């Protein structure tokens, strides 16, 4: 029997790890699978039985069609995509420029600015929500999708994430670019960005999820039901679905699918992280 190397888990240790992973998977994926199962059940199936069936007896997409017929769900989805798109673009551009400036450019007061960014993370969002509303109202952006997206267009956490990513780029690359006569924008585009693609994908995913799932701020800003985002629209009409959990589950799945699509498109960059994008050529 070959000897195990240092740190190699025993068979019992491996079994315990897989058991723990299975438990975590059940806790995280289980509710989602149950909602998916409920959304596919027909009106003749009892979802409140003492021993509920996990698999639908006769799967149907009629619940999804009924959701679309009951509320303007696709209008709400477009509104949410618009808000999320503005937030993603704002954070990708703003957080990248701010993170690069704090990390690579030398100017007076850089430590003070960085400290202010860190200080804003201490404040919960509810503390500033009144001032945000007053600001948006003074700009005439209440009851608009731009007013919903504007406060989250540049998140301080994303600035700090990009700052950390640019800090991890070897300074020798910047020095070599300076020797070759590269300016600030050339260093950002050709040296900085190829090395922070992993963190940039993290910013995109977190920003999209945060903007897509936000409920309180759109509820405060928006008054016209036609401008509601998907989360507000579904919750606002929750009374319509009170007697039919199948429709609630179908609406939840509709709201969840875009998040899955964004994560699936960016997951390879997400998991490779900051070190994924090395300078080529």
Image: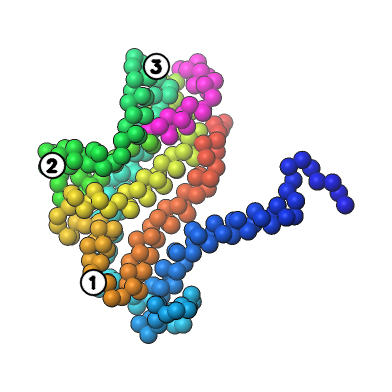
Q: Dot 2 surroundings within 10 Å: few (below 14), some, or many (20 or more)?
A: some
Residue at label 1? Answer: 240
Which of the marked residues, 2 or 3, is nearer the chain's N terminus? 3
Question: Which label belongs to residue 272?
Answer: none
Image check: 171 left or right of 134? right
Residue at label 2? Answer: 137
Q: How far apart in space, not on screen, are marks 2 and 3 (Cα)?
A: 36 Å
Image check: 174 left or right of 134? right
User: In the picture shown, does residue 162 fall above or below 227?
Assistant: above
Question: Which label belongs to residue 106?
Answer: 3
Name the quadrant containing residue 37. bottom left
| Rendered residue at 19%/56% (across/down) | 227
Q: How far apart in space, not on screen, are marks 1 and 3 (Cα)?
A: 57 Å
Can I make out residue 64 in this image? no
Q: Residue furthest right?
A: 1
Q: How far apart in space, not on screen, are marks 1 and 2 (Cα)?
A: 31 Å
Residue 268 locus on image (x, y percent): 52, 48
């Amino acid at each position: 029997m070959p000897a195990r190397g240092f740190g190699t888990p025993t068979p019992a240790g491996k079994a315990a790890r897989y058991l723990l992973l299975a438990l975590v998977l059940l806790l995280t994926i289980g509710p989602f699978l149950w909602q998916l199962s409920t959304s596919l059940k027909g009106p003749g199936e009892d979802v409140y039985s003492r021993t509920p069936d996990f698999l639908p007896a006769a799967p149907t997409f009629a619940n999804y069609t009924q959701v679309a017929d009951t509320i303007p769900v696709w209008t709400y989805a477009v509104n949410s995509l618009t808000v999320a798109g503005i937030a993603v673009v704002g954070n990708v551009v703003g957080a990248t420029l701010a993170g690069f400036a704090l990390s690579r450019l030398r100017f007076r007061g850089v430590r003070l600015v960085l400290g202010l960014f860190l200080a804003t993370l201490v404040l919960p969002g509810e503390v500033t929500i009144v001032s945000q509303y007053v600001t948006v109202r003074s700009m005439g952006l209440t009851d608009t999708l731009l007013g919903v997206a504007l406060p989250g267009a540049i998140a301080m956490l994303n600035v700090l994430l990009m700052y950390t990513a640019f800090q991890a780029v070897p300074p020798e690359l910047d020095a070599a670019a300076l020797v070759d006569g590269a300016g600030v924008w050339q260093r950002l585009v050709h040296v900085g960005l190829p090395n922070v693609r992993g963190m940039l994908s993290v910013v995109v995913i977190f920003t999209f999820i945060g903007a897509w799932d936000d409920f309180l701020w759109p509820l405060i800003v928006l008054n016209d039901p036609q401008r509601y985002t998907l989360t507000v629209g579904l919750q606002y009409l929750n009374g319509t679905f009170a007697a039919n959990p199948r429709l609630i589950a179908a609406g939840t799945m509709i709201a969840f699918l875009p998040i899955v699509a964004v994560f699936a498109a960016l997951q390879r960059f997400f998991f490779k992280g900051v070190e994924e994008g090395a300078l080529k050529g």
